[in-house]
Structure formats: structure tokens, C-alpha cells
Amino acid sequence: MKIVIVSDTHMPRNGRGLPDRLQQDLTECDLIIHGGDFQTLDVYKEFVGYGELIAVAGNVDSAELQSLLPKKRIVQKNGLKIGVVHGDGKGKTTEKRALEAFEEDEVDVIIFGHSHIPFSRFMKGVLLFNPGSPTDKRKLPYFSHGILTIEDTWKVEHTFYH
């Protein structure tokens, strides 16, 4: 099973669409997980056009998306429990807010966004993964998203591109 992990698409912005590299992975995946900040319902619908989408609302999503999507959710795929949250809020680091969002839940992986900074680290026995952003890299050298592969075991990796 191939899962594309993406967050912080912040579109439309400067007339730019989804990068070719991301579109290629979206056409080849079994599932898409989006960590919020689509920005508009049209962008959400664009992702739905690629296949099954699991998503949460981010802090810059439109009121329409805020009412459509939960702030946090847990999904189980092939025995792997995945928590999804945007990670915005006050105080603490984005990583700590994401981890705290699931402190009452048993999850194997927490997918979050908000900071636009690619992140992959185990904290308290849970893998925290931020795919970065495919459209708004801020001061980083590359755009990015993630690929979660679940077979007999699972692995998650960043995909970086210009």
C-alpha cells in the first residue's frame, strides 16, 4: 500500500498548481492523507479527484472546509494506526502540540503540518512525521511531501524537489 502524505498546499497561490512530482505520486497511490491548510474547497476537491482522501482542517482553511473536516482523526490501514492533526496552536513546538493531541490515544504514527518544515522523528515511541509543503517551502531549499509504504513492515520517507 502506497500512501501519499501532504500538508500545507496553501492554494491557490501565485497561480501555481500542484507540482508535477506530487501529481505523479498522487496518480500512483492507494490513499492520500492531507494534514490541513488546503485553503479552499476547490483544492480539497482537486485532491479528492486523485482518489481516497483522509484530511483534517488547518488554521487557514476556509470556513467551508473548517465545517467539513475534523481538526483531528485516527485511521487504521493494514494494522497501522495513524493520527492526523494540523498542529497549529499557542505555545510549545508544533511537534509537541501534535504529540499532545494524541496523548490519550494509541497511535503508531502522527502526521501533522503547520510549520512547513519536513520532520521525521520518534518521540515517546510514536513516529511524528511532517511532510513539509509541496507549494510553500518558506526558507527551505526544497518543496516536499511524504510517502508511507505499508507491506510486511512500514516505512515513511520524504520526497524532495525544486
Image (tube, rainbow, N blue to C red):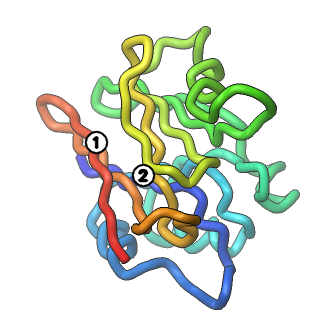
Q: Nearer the viewer, residue 106 or 45?
A: 106
Tell me the CA gap for discs 1 and 2: 9 Å
Q: For mark 2, what is the residue?
A: 5
Q: Tell me which residue sits at (28%, 42%) in the image.
A: 156
Q: Tell me which residue sits at (37%, 81%) in the image.
A: 20
Q: Amino acid at mark 1?
A: Val
- Report the number of discs: 2
Q: For mark 1, what is the residue?
A: 156
Coordinates of residue 147 in the picture (x, y in percent): 31, 52
Q: Tell me which residue sits at (41%, 62%) in the image.
A: 144
| SS class, disc 1 | strand
Q: Nearer the viewer, residue 160 or 51?
A: 160
Q: Quadrant of residue 119?
A: top left
Q: Amino acid at mark 2?
A: Ile
Identify the mark nearer the N-term, 1 or 2. Answer: 2
Against 47, residue 113 (above or below) is: above
Q: Residues within 10 Å of mark 2 (few under 14, many from 20)?
A: many
| SS class, disc 2 | strand
Q: Tell me which residue sits at (42%, 68%) in the image.
A: 141
Against 78, residue 70 (above or below) is: below
Q: Are marks 1 and 2 in contact (CB under 8 Å)?
A: yes
Coordinates of residue 129 in the picture (x, y in percent): 43, 38
Coordinates of residue 18 in the picture (x, y in percent): 49, 78
Image quadrant occupied by the C terminus:
bottom left
Q: Residues within 10 Å of mark 1 (few under 14, many from 20)?
A: some
Q: Quadrant of residue 123?
A: top left
> Which disc is residue 80 wearing?
none
Q: Nearer the viewer, residue 15 or 105?
A: 15
